């Protein structure tokens, strides 16, 4: 039994590590929303293994361990085969979206290749839980404990071997596991040696590569994002690094250096500079394009020039904003950048190329998240600047539409205002300025300020020219008429003052947008989501209210040309479903089809389905509730704790690890506490429901108390708050397995399949509910699901009595 438990631990670790590695890979070679779509579709096959075992159960004889060894061997083999197999597919993602036959066929082949290892992993778990159902409380502990470690282990390995290397590591762990279970001394010796060799391959490549761009095994890109695919083909990539936050490529464009985040989803540039700020300033605005890209980069710095200004840059990236601050006489610049390797690029690897801007004694570079940095400081600034680096291609692909954006919420603007001096300026360049205005207006109202319109300027390209990054300027003191008159002609080219406090009749937005309270009638009139984003509903980039093309501005509906063009760009030729919601539509449709498959096929064809046994439907409903309820709580916790912890990677790792290890301990302790279908069965449900309700009640105050702590203090605080809910939720699944373990053969496998199916469906539901109702109501929905699970479990007990 100890070998079985250790094998469960290793395969659970490998499964989650491989899933996370593939998510990172497809974030780069596709877009994030498409990566979510393909990996979610693949995870249906993890539960599909339960359906297969309900139809054709593996014989539980004396060779069961040898059969399990075979499953783990082929699991590892398929993981190792993914790199060459997928790289051989002639898949163009853009053509597939518009219905090209060969690309659709390649996509189908890709789906089957990705599904195979997870189907085998699902078979492994299903067979063990079916065969050893009486020991489920201990075995489920090892399953969850392995998964908990699997969500952490990728972090230290990623910079050295990349996610493709992690698949080699996973394959090696599978073969080591096969050796633990194999029959015969020969196989018990050979398979672990093969596993060690497979795991060592990416490490050898990493440490023997001649340059940074060749240190990883890489998957070929299936879509061109900002020219990165072409740069790889032309061999102009100078540096390539898998930072835990993003993959970073530095590309030689012949002049500037292009910093490509995640294969070009976002971009920044390093412009050549000799460090002579006086000469650069004298050459402006003529030298703008070759040094900054656009005048909007240095607008706020020009306004505060030579005033001994203190500056905060959120998202320092390639350094244009930092260079702008120094050019116009900043006293000190705090340059905050989330990706540590990008800071290293600026301070070390390209310091001679960029003029040493990040090594200037007036600059302090910080590896941190913007709001986390602000919360830990009481410093006041003359300028706070945040310049988005989303590309037009990522916008068109719908990437990020369903992602949380905590830098664009009313609470974020409140923190910006509170860290500005009495005459300070906030400059933000981000898409969709009407929603930026309503979000900032809510924050302005929340801090007790009035007359917001007098404090706001918006600059944008004239109608007919798409401007992805309009400039929002908010000053804590009102703008004067003389200042605004000068700024109306400050920009060269097609940029104009779109929102003018002294000429409101020439501005698109009405006074209501600046009030902090947009009426339901006005919000309904606007053809996109324009209401203020909040920390409870931080989906600023999710704009779509309806499917449709917009070929011009609609000022009467408060829609500017750039927002209209943004929404329309998410339709490609012959594409019916817009890219920003395509992944949800596809996964939701697949969920319905898989739900029918998971329920009807076993019901009609399996022994467990055809045999009448007490509590059958209640049992299926019970395990469905557990799958959906657990994943909803976990995913909402990830989003909520982003506010406390700040770093996305730290947040994900801390929440998932805490949830899984707490659930593992709950499963183990449930056996020691005597929890079974006969006694103490109410405790897991009561504990889960009360823990989640208590969390909803206390987390705002709890977060406020710990926000000023260090990053590791905040992580520890997050783990402590998560543990109670995870502990009790971990008791429910083994309790259900004990309840159905005496039912007809295949019942446990069917239960596992339904649990896996609704884990995927619950993930989709958590996104949709949180977008429309917010995180708190989504957690309440999870509470209701666990209450329903309690009712169904009571029906199961009554039927079996």
Image (tube, rainbow, N blue to C red):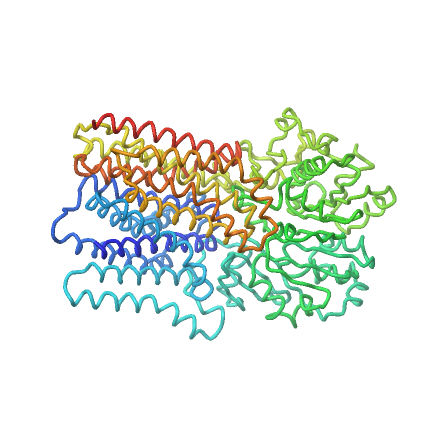
Residue 200 place in picture, x, y as percent: 35, 69
Residue 298 place in picture, x, y as percent: 74, 55
Q: Classify 513 as above or below 226.
A: above
State the residue at coordinates (56%, 62%).
Answer: 340
Residue 590 place in picture, x, y as percent: 37, 37
For the view shown, which residue lies furthest in the right direction?
482
Residue 236 place in picture, x, y as percent: 53, 67
For the view shown, which residue lies furthest in the front direction?
673
State the residue at coordinates (60%, 31%).
Answer: 527
Quadrant where the C terminus sits is top left
Q: Quadrant of residue 155?
A: bottom left
Q: Classify 670 as above or below 162.
A: above
Q: Is residue 471 left or right of residue 757?
A: right
State the count of labels: 0
Using the image as rendered, state which of residue 618 and residue 533 is in the foreground.
618
State the residue at coordinates (35%, 62%).
Answer: 169
For the view shown, which residue lies furthest in the top direction?
521
Q: Classify 745 as above or below 644.
A: above
């Amino acid at each position: 039994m100890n070998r079985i438990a250790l094998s469960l631990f290793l395969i659970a670790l490998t499964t989650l590590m491989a899933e996370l590695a593939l998510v990172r890979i497809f974030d780069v070679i596709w877009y994030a929303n498409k990566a979510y779509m393909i990996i979610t579709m693949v995870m249906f096959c993890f539960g599909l293994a339960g359906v297969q075992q309900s139809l054709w159960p593996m014989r539980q004889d004396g060779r069961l361990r040898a059969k399990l060894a075979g499953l783990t061997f082929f699991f590892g083999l398929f993981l190792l085969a993914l790199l060459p197999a997928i790289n051989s597919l002639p898949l163009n993602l853009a053509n597939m979206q518009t219905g090209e036959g060969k690309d659709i066929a390649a996509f189908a082949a890709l789906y089957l290749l990705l599904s195979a290892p997870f189907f085998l992993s699902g078979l492994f778990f299903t067979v063990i839980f079916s065969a050893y159902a009486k020991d489920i409380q201990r075995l489920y502990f090892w399953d969850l404990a392995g998964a908990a470690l699997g969500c952490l282990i990728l972090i230290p390995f990623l910079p050295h071997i990349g996610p493709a290397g992690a698949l080699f590591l996973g394959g090696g762990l599978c073969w080591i596991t096969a050796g633990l279970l194999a029959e015969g001394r020969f196989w018990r010796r050979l398979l672990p040696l093969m596993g060690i060799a497979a795991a060592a391959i990416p490490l050898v490549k990493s440490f023997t590569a001649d340059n940074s761009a060749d240190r990883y095994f890489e998957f070929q890109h299936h879509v061109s994002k900002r020219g990165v695919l072409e740069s790889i083909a032309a061999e102009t990539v100078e540096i390539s690094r898998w930072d835990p936050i993003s993959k970073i490529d530095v590309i030689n464009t012949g002049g500037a250096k292009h910093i490509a985040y995640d294969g070009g989803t976002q971009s920044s540039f390093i412009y050549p500079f000799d460090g002579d700020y006086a000469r650069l300033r004298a050459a402006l605005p003529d030298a703008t394009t070759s040094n900054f890209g656009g005048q909007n980069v240095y607008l706020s710095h020009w306004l505060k020039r030579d005033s001994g200004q203190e500056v905060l840059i959120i998202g320092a990236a390639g350094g244009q904003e930092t260079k702008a601050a120094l050019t116009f006489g900043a006293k000190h610049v705090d340059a905050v950048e989330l990706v540590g390797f990008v800071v290293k690029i600026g301070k070390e690897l390209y310091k001679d190329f960029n003029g040493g801007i990040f090594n200037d004694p007036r600059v302090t570079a910080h590896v941190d998240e913007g709001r986390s940095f602000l919360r830990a400081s009481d410093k006041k600034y003359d300028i706070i600047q945040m310049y988005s680096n989303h590309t037009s291609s990522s916008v068109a692909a719908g990437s990020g539409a369903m992602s949380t954006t905590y830098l664009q919420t009313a609470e974020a603007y409140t923190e910006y205002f509170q860290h500005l001096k009495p005459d300070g300026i906030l400059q933000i360049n981000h898409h969709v300025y009407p929603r930026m205005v309503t979000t900032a207006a809510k924050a302005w109202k929340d801090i007790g300020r009035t007359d917001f319109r007098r404090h706001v300027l918006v600059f944008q390209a004239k109608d007919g020219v798409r401007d992805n990054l309009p400039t929002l300027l908010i000053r804590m003191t009102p703008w004067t008429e003389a200042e605004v008159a000068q700024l109306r002609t400050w920009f060269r080219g097609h940029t104009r003052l779109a929102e003018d406090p002294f000429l409101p009749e020439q501005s698109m937005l009405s006074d209501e947008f600046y009030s902090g309270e947009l009426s339901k009638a006005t919000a309904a009139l606007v053809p996109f989501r324009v209401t203020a984003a909040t920390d409870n509903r931080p989906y600023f980039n999710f704009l779509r209210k309806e499917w449709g093309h917009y070929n011009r501005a609609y000022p009467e509906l408060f829609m500017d040309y750039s927002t209209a063009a943004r929404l329309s760009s998410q339709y490609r030729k012959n594409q019916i479903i817009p890219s920003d919601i395509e992944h949800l539509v596809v996964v939701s449709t697949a969920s319905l089809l898989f739900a029918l498959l998971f329920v009807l096929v076993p019901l009609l064809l399996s022994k467990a389905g055809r045999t009448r046994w007490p509590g059958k439907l209640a049992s299926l409903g019970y395990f469905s509730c557990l799958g959906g309820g657990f994943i909803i709580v976990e995913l909402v916790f990830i989003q909520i704790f982003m506010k406390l912890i700040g770093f996305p990677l730290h947040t994900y790792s801390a929440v998932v690890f805490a949830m899984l290890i707490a659930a593992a301990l709950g499963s183990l302790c449930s056996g020691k506490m005597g929890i079974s279908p006969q006694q103490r069965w109410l405790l897991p449900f009561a504990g889960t429901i009360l823990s989640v309700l208590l969390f909803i009640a206390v987390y705002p105050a709890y977060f406020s108390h710990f926000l000023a702590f260090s990053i590791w203090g905040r992580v520890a605080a997050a783990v402590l708050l998560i543990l109670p809910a995870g502990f009790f939720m971990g008791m429910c699944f083994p309790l259900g397995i004990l309840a159905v373990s005496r039912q007809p053969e295949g019942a446990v496998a069917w239960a596992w399949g339904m649990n896996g199916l609704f884990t995927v469906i619950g993930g989709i539901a958590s996104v949709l509910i949180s977008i429309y109702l917010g995180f708190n109501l989504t957690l309440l929905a999870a509470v209701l699901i666990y209450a329903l699970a309690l009712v169904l479990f009571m029906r199961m007990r009554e039927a079996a009595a």
